[in-house]
Amino acid sequence: MLFCVRAVSGAAQRVLLAPVCGFQTLAVVARSVSFSPGQVTSNASFHSVSSESDHPKVLITGGLGQLGVGLAKLLRMRFGKYNVILSDIRKPPNHVYQSGPFIYSDILDYKNLREIVVNNRITWLIHYSALLSAVGEANVSLARDVNITGLHNVLDIAVEHGLRLFIPSTIGAFGSSSPRNPTPDLCIQRPRTIYGVSKVHAELMGEYYHHRFGLDFRCLRYPGIISADSQPGGGTTDYAVQMFHDAVKTSTFVCNLRPDTRLPMMFIEDCLRATLEVLEAPAEILSMRTYNISAMSFTPEELIREIRRHLPDLQVTYKIDPVRQAIADSWPMILDDASARSDWGWKHDYGLPELVQTMLNFTGSDSRMSQAN
Ligand SMILES: NC(=O)C1=CN([C@@H]2O[C@H](COP(=O)(O)OP(=O)(O)OC[C@H]3O[C@@H](n4cnc5c(N)ncnc54)[C@H](O)[C@@H]3O)[C@@H](O)[C@H]2O)C=CC1
Ligand SMILES: CC(=O)[C@H](N)C(=O)O
């Protein structure tokens, strides 16, 4: 059984904590029991005595959303199952709980987050917790707390403990006064959503901490991400994911964006690989700390046309959501990612035809399985 020891405040109180559920959950508060530094060291080093010891120890915040579980899977293949800890404030489904270490972490609880970083000797922090564009507009004060106050906690802990910190930004960090076709890495950024404002803040704070305190901050501006086995968390680009599921299940789809709304999009596999690549890139080749990455751009009508090549019966109607439409109209149509391509060799694998084929294979086989059950 694995334990690590936390000194809470002075020697009087010690807490024995199993670091993550994947190792077995056990918390014992031992008041007035003292442990020698040797015990602390041996318990802590016990974690690292394994063939996985040379790898980074990774913590993913907000890991139960659309992207975190897939990223954990990729990083565990690379660094070993026990070197990657997923965390969130939600209860993990069985398959996630059983697939590797998971721990509760609310990024608004600074001390708890710090304790997790210390007890598990985290070296890389991947900060995925956020409220996305549409849910952010529906709850501005919560979005401000999670996306800005939570970010400050993460930045401070990363600096204190010398972590490599990855924070994704988004096409939503641009606004209607940014050039939209294409949108370069460096241009005017005046978004009008709390999501966009908080992501510009994250980009600037991360870069400032890099220059001021030497924080190893890395950031990619993701396009809208399309995934088959995880649901999006309340964004403007979610329509595209939903279209695949509805096309396969009911052959009908109600689209909440206008047919000609062009947005940058990316298949999840490309997004997660890009994340790993920029995390592993030697610092010397990074001429910037925040990069656009791009794969394809399409409109709802172009996506429908491509899906109809496989599912000709798909019927689509439009019920425009004015909030999402206004957001989409202010976002880039095409992201210019030339710097990512030249600095660290970014290259996408999936264009629109490959995306549609792959998504229909996944969602089609899922739906056939659930019908058979
Ligand atoms: N999915 C996409 O299309 C894109 C995502 N991104 C960024 O990638 C990151 C991950 O995105 P998704 O997985 O799609 O987001 P999501 O909305 O699916 O998941 C976010 C997670 O954060 C968690 N969370 C909320 N409050 C929290 C708190 N106080 N403490 C800890 N966790 C908390 C939620 O429980 C949720 O599981 C986000 O930062 C997002 O801005 C950027 C561009 C595109
Ligand atoms: C592009 C994003 O950041 C996200 N999917 C959203 O639509 O809010």
Image (cartoon, rainbow, N blue to C red):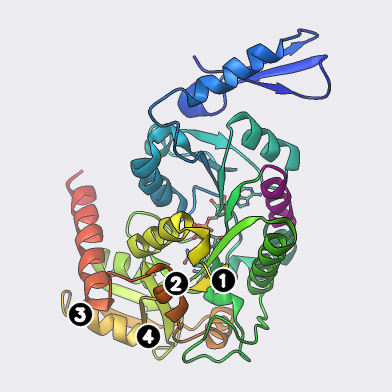
Residue found at x 42% / y 51%: 71
Distance from mark 3 CB to nearest ligand 1 atom below 8 Å: no
Per the model, the C-alpha gap separating discs 4 and 3 is: 14 Å
Q: From the viewer's perspective, is 161 left or right of 120?
A: right
Per the model, the C-alpha gap separating discs 2 and 1 is: 9 Å
Q: Quadrant of ligand 1?
A: bottom right
Q: Earlier in the sequence, mark 2 or mark 1?
A: 1
The residue singled out by tag 3 in the image is 308
Q: Earlier in the sequence, mark 4 or mark 2?
A: 4
Residues shaded magenta: 149-161
Q: Is residue 16 visible?
A: yes
Q: Nearer the viewer, residue 2 or 55?
A: 55
Q: Is residue 357 magenta?
A: no
**For the residues bearing labels 4 and 2, Cβ distance under 8 angstroms:** no
Q: Is residue 289 above or below residue 337?
A: above
Q: Position of residue 354 (x, y in %)?
A: 22, 72
Q: Nearer the viewer, residue 41 or 32?
A: 41
The residue singled out by tag 4 in the image is 299
